[in-house]
Image (tube, coloured by chain):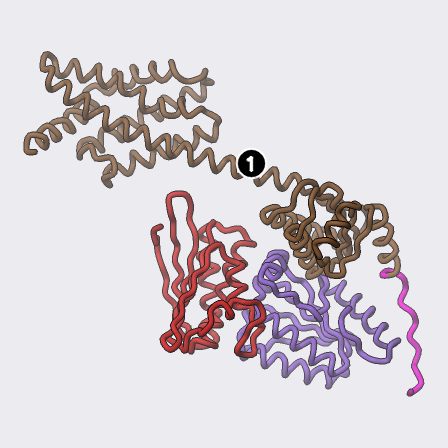
Chain colours: A brown, B purple, C red
Amino acid sequence: MAEATATGSASKNRLADLLSRREPEIAASWLRHQDKITRRLSAGERQEWERQSREFLGLLRSAATMGTDVSASVWEPVRHFLNDISASRARSGFSPLETASFIFSLKQPLFEALREVCGSDANAFAVEVWGTTELLDSLGLLTAEAFQKTREEVISRQQQELLELSTPVVQLWTGILALPLIGTLDSARTQVVMQNLLDAIVKTRSDFAIIDITGVPVVDTLVAQHLLKTVAAARLMGAECLISGIRPQIAQTIIHLGVDLGGVITKATLADAFALALRRSGRMFAPAPQTEAMPES
Amino acid sequence: MERIPILKMGEYLLVTIQVDMHDRRALTLQDDLTDQIVKHNSHGVLIDISALEMVDSFIGRMLGSIASMARLLDAQTVVVGMQPSVAITLVELGLSLKGIRTALDVEKGMAALRGALSDARQNGHASGQL
Amino acid sequence: MRVVNSELLELRQPEDIVQVRQAVRKKAVLLGFNLVDQTKVVTASSELARNTLDYGGGGTASIEVIENDRRGGLRVVFEDHGPGIENIELALTDGYTTGAGLGLGLSGAKRLSHEFEISSKPGSGTRVSILRWK
């Protein structure tokens, strides 16, 4: 054990020592190796990668003087740095391989430098290579995890954007909105639908919203619940909802399942619903009847 | 504890709730409002909740009580200005606010009151919502 | 799951409910919750804070910022040493109330949260915990 500790401390000092004495060559060699694996970089990207590589070597040197346990707090700047560049590369569309190669392509340059330093001491060289490999592998795993996490965030955000794009609210007339739903209505989608609809009601000061479900393949009790939630939310904003696009099969399913649409007015077509909304609007904006003094009754 | 101000707007009363409601304020508001309805013989009350970032069942209950009391005093109530995030949360919470008329803002609220009041006069009494 | 930080608030009088709401709102904003999600967690907290006061005879609310490997969240834990709840299932049904409430406190808070836990012992108290992930 004492021996292991001795070689451990020797190893950590060797690495830090190596990095401070031979940084320029290691950096140059490293960049050459990175170039081999990544796609063609623009001039700006290349400059950025060079700067990042140099910065990383500096951080690596400082941390390595204190030991090679990457989970220790002295390695926090290194971990943080790797997290950041992995995330930014994930967002920029680099592949996992290209991103991980940032770390793994550092192995060769380090081994070359170590071999020169160890000279004829094969044993020392083996120990150093092993220590360095372990270190870089842990760091490489960190970058892979950070990359994965960012990719998932990007995908999740793109899904959200798709969701919003697929639930447009259209203004048919002053005070009358239409919401043509296409596809299934699940809990997540309903949240987006409600938000879009309510925001549109506020913006256009609409009194009517026509939810057209022609494009909704199935209306079961769950979908009906989501529809009713949307209707209730719109009502709280002072807008009345009509549901249109009730196909014959949908009507049958609704009755068979005993779905209760809660008294919401439904129409077979968007046109019918629009006509009704127009009539109701007309009545709303008709001049109020003159009230005369009524005789006491 | 500041009282919530009640403004007279023509034949209607306007209550703007801007502070965080708690029990005493709610009770005081109900007392003040019923007094004012009788004092001014108002037949319409607008409750503006556009400043409320949250409505829970307590506030829902308070709004319902106000609407019921007002109805007994022959006045219609409209709650206006609910924020979209509040509406979505209320629906999720399961609070339907049935029996309470709602409108987008004060202007539409007044139009709703005019409509409700002309219905009421035709029927000879203050009708409930819907 | 780790607790990153937590804040303990007393619930002794009605004004304390307002404090709890404001504290939860602040934390939710800090965590970057969108407006609807903020409103949901604040509303759920308001319901439970009221329950703690009205039915639990007062107690505490602990607002905790938590995180696991994948994401962060906000947890609020309400505890009281009141009479406790005899029949939790019944208490969780919409409209059930032993007081003058609307009976939506527990069930509503559950609907507004991603995770919900409740434990109660008649005679010794109740603990309700709600969690909303970002």
> Which is nearer the eye, A224 or C71?
A224
Write the residue at 43% across / 52% down: C73
Q: Which residues are magenta?
A: A284-297
Q: Is residue C108 magenta?
A: no
Whether residue C47 is visible? no
Quarter of the rendering occupied by the N terminus of chain A:
top left
Write the residue at 73% across / 49% down: A253
Q: Is residue A259 left or right of residue C66?
A: right
Q: Residue furthest left?
A: A2
- In the rendered image, the vertical position of residue A128 relative to residue A153, given as above or below: above
Quarter of image, res A225: bottom right
Q: Pointer 1: what residue?
A: A158
Whether residue C41 is visible? yes
Q: Is residue A209 left or right of residue C5?
A: right
Residue C63 pos. (x, y %): 40, 61
> Which is nearer the eye, A270 or A8?
A270
